[in-house]
Amino acid sequence: MEKDLIILKEYCHNSNVDQSFILLLEEGGLVEFVIIEGERYIEESQLGDLEMFSRLYYDLSINVEGIDAINHLLNKVIQLRNEIMELKNRLTLYESDDSEIVEII
């Protein structure tokens, strides 16, 4: 399975992000690089997260540790939403319409 890769230097240049910031994110475990022949690449699937992390860092002055905490909480919210949807779906299996209720005497 081939993934779409973006050269880290080009991403940083095009989005006006310091490469050192991306390296800090990588040290914190928030992004992963693919290294091919000594060149660092970012998977295209990480671009949304990188954009969010950059906005938190540059626009809101949140440090990498804060970004990690926010990312953890956002992932937890998504997990809990999925769990709620799953439980709602399971609950509908046990519910019935009022018109289908038959009283047994």
Image (cartoon, rainbow, N blue to C red):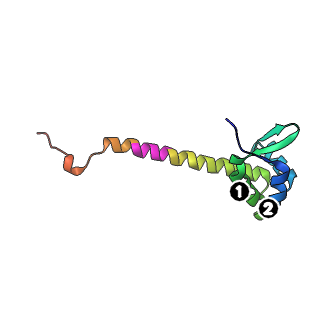
Residue 91 drawn above or below residue 63: above
Q: Position of residue 37 (x, y in %)?
A: 87, 36
- Characterize the magenta stretch by its predominant secondary structure: helix
Q: Amino acid at mark 1?
A: Met
The residue that mark 2 highlights is: 58
| Residue 14 appears left or right of 44 | right
| Label ID, residue 104 | none
Left or right: 91 in relation to 47: left
* Element at label 1: helix
Count up the numbered dots.
2
Tell me where residue 28 sits by quadrant. top right
The reply to whether residue 77 is in sight is yes
Above or below residue 52? Residue 27 is above
Disc 1: which residue: 52
**Residue 46 vs residue 105, the one in the foreground:** 46
Q: Which residues are magenta?
A: 83-89
Where residue 25 appears, x then y in whole percent? Answer: 79, 47
> Hey, what amino acid is under mark 2?
Tyr
Residue 17 in sight in this render: no
Q: Residue at x 68, y 53 (%)?
A: 48
In magenta stretch: residue 100: no
